[in-house]
Amino acid sequence: MNKQTLPIQGATCQGCVKRIDAALEVVPGVTAVSVDLPGQRVTVSGDASRQAVQEALVESGYAADPAAADETAPLAQADQDQDQDQDQDQDQDVQLSISGAHCASCVRTIEDALGAVPGVAKASMNLADRTARVSGRARPNDLVRAVQSAGYQASEVRDPHTAEQEREEQERSLYKKLLGQTALSLAVGVPVMLWGWAGGSMTVEPGTPGQVAWFVVGLVTLAMLVFPGRHFFVGGWKAFRHHNANMDTLIAVGTAAAWAYSMVVVIAPLVLPAAARHVYFEASPMIIGLVNLGLALEMRARGKTGAAVKRLLGLRAKTARVVRDGEEIDLPVEQVREGDRLRVRPGETLAVDGEVEDGDSSVDESMLTGEPMPVRKGPGDSVAAGTLNDSGTLIYRATRVGADTALARIIDLVKKAQGAKPPIGRLADSVAAVFVPAILLIAVSAALAWYNFGPNPPLAYMMVAATSVLIIACPCALGLATPMSVMVGVGKAAEAGILIRQGEALQTAAGLDTVVLDKTGTLTEGKPAVTRVIAADGDEQHVLALAAALEAGSEHPLGRAILDEAKRRQLTPPAVSDFQSSNGLGVSATQEGATLRLGNRRWLEQQGVAMTLDQAARSLSDDAATPLFLARDTQLLGVIGVADRIKTDSADAVARLRDSGLKVIMITGDVQATADAIARQAGSDEVLAEVLPEDKAAHVARLQQQGAKVAMVGDGINDAPALAQADVGFAIGTGTDVAIESAAITLMSGSLHGVADAMAISRATLRNIKQNLFGAFIYNSLGVPIAAGLLYPFTGWLLSPVIAGAAMSLSSVTVVSNANRLRLFKPRQRRPQGERP
Amino acid sequence: MSTFLVNLSGLVLMALIVWWFWLSSKGRATQHSGGVIDIMVDHGVYEPAVIKTAAGATLQLRFERRDASPCAEQVVFHGLDVSETLAIGEVTTVTLTPTQPGTYRFTCQMQMYQGTLIVE
């Protein structure tokens, strides 16, 4: 069958598609018509002549202009040739991800459904990875729909990078189009305006050549309304039919009013008093030009507000090196399955979440956690998609792929939160919802007021005041004030490793006055570590090495702490024999004929060890560490302090919180003495010790009853009720567990600085929102009355519609730009390590 | 006489504005009990703009954004804590299962696009 493709232009909606279909279907020989809206072309099957089809297109009003047609004609011709070659080179592969298909018969159903879509050359489904590959020229959309109507779910699998590029390309072309429309309408509006400014006559004398000249200007202006201003009228009309009114409505009514009035002046000057025979032909093109310019600028600025998500999207790897049967193959990341073994080489991005099986390397996780220091990874450690492998090679097993990876969930969460509304935006929301019809009412009332009380000629003043009101009113600034700032603020937080799950938390976090910190895992590392080694003879390394020898292979947390520390100090434990464990009291072994013992004080005393180093042991206890004593026969060699150490930056972060006026309270189940010791190290104001896990929420509630605005910081699992009870719950994540349901805010880095950062960001965002809202409300509540002519009785001022147009486009650009300013906000100055303020 | 006529027509116009935009119904609702609904996002309106559905049923709203202007970029469901970014020229599916009967508005960020989801 013969197919031909022709370029079209101006088709923007389904309605256009219907009209084009209708226009072409009646052409003799045409059997099928397929309109490609994004590609702005139409493919016609059948034996119709190209000439006839083109003519029908011209008649329908959607033919591409001749220049463009010439440009694409050779291409279209080539298309046609290839079509006869069975579409080979033109075929485009579409990959669909299918869900709901479980059996071989489903495969058949889906393939049949896809095959029935016009333009599909071949469709094959792979049940194993639940994808379908379709070649041909069908639109992905139609394919998805076909699968859905067959009773399954489908979505197009697209290379996110290409999709992003396409999107940018489209935005760029719209931007250019808007600028083009701006230039065109200003080219008409500016000369007319200058003519008036230069003292040229703007009034019409009946029967003079001037009347004819103005008539011509009127027609040119009409062209501006019809072409560059078309979208305002189409949008306004569509909204009107839905009983809605929007910005388009205001612009359309305003420009149409100015034009219609002027045209009446030109055509029938005699119906108006002489003083009212003034034309306002500069107004419509100037307004259309300025508002289009404003839209273009706003689009530019908006592109930047989404930078955070764009950055996260950019972290996704495209391919992964999968190890299968000893062979390594590069696969698109979509095809990686759970359980696959993957290799990541130095400098590469990890493709999916997984667990390291082999290798040793440091991984830069800063893009997810905000933590600048690379993290050492070895067998058993978990790794996350999007993080950057540094110098070594890792083999890891995929544990979460596709939309389940931490990165994918972070992107999802950030996108969601960016659209959330903090309560402060509610007033603006309810105003925005009724704004445009209210402005229409004000415009009519203003016109009536001028008619009844204004000077002569009333008709001209009515028109100017009403038009200015319509044009100056800016629902955009009002509607954009909150969302733009939230978008930038949430993005900013994500960059710092802070995931804000609720819009409300963004606002509440700015007004907190008390922070309750859980001890274990929040202030502290959450697992015991060696804090100090005290040797009787001063040789700490020797004491630690012996202790490590005794604990070799231990799974006890205290034993692991000693082994980790020995490994960190790169000590080689000496060989020991006759290893014995004494019921949790301690361990013993023989080395070179002597008995080594490591254990608690009472056990060693029972074994007849002479206890020295009392002073040192007590100081360990004071620091909340558990002392472990090491003895050779009856001689004490040293004491090792093991404790759940506070994180290196906890004290710094607590100090920062206190500096910003917050009361810091530590909450823990530990006995008072241990709790006090940790609290002293961290520098918290108060300690709530010996609190049962289930009572934490009650303590938070008690603080709230006392009037405090409480933030609870905890690990999200044991502390869930307290997190939910608090005004804002902060969950400390360990790297990448992102979806902590009970908390409003998740800190991915595990550092308490995140709490202070989150509060700083939310304060900055709230401030930004307030500026925007204030600006938008002030702008509208001053601009509209001034445009209506409220100042006229006192000062004789009446705004020209052109100035109103300029002010209106400036106002929304200002809001977006102010929100963008937030991007420069830095929650904290990073100090070099170890340096105190 | 003309003074009276002008004032009268002004007031009538205002009454019409109030009636058309606020008092009259926002158009016929399309009735669904869950399932897939295609919504065209173009020229400042969602089409269909009023959707009725049964509580507890899962809806898949497939927004096809044709309008490249930035206003159309986000769709926000007020009161349901759902929002989604719509890519130009693509279909973005928003899946939601409203359980509480009520009337929820869905709009773009600037509320120029307006739609209503009625859950019964």
Image: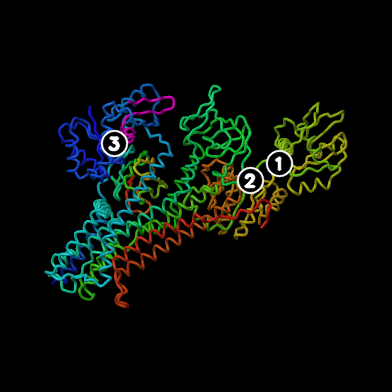
User: Disc 1 is attached to a residue of which chain?
Assistant: A
Up-down: is A88 above or below A374? above
Indicate the quadrant containing the N terminus of chain A: top left, top right, bottom left or bottom right: top left
The tag on residue A529 is 1
Give the magenta range: A122-145
* Residue at the image point whose x is 28% and y is 39% from the top: A72
Render colour scheme: rainbow
Front: mark 3 or 1: 3
Circles 2, 3 touching at the beta carbon (< 8 Å): no
Tell me how far mark 1 sits from mark 2, CA to CA. 24 Å
What amino acid is labelled 1 in the image? Ala
Indicate the quadrant containing the C terminus of chain A: top left, top right, bottom left or bottom right: bottom right
Q: Which residue is mark 3?
A: A75
Of mark 3 and mark 1, the one earlier in the sequence is 3
What amino acid is labelled 3 in the image? Leu
Determine which quarter of the picture holds residue A214. Answer: bottom left
Tell me how far mark 2 sits from mark 3, CA to CA. 76 Å
- Residue A133 magenta: yes
- Between B113 and A372, the residue placed more toward the observer is A372
Q: Residues within 10 Å of mark 1 (few under 14, many from 20)?
A: many
Task: Assign a secondary structure to mark 1.
Answer: strand
Residue A236 visible in image? no
What amino acid is labelled 2 in the image? Leu
User: Disc 2 is attached to a residue of which chain?
Assistant: A
Image coords of residue A731 (percent x, y): 56, 46
Up-down: is A713 above or below A358? below
Position of B85 with respect to A24 (left or right) is: right
The tag on residue A692 is 2
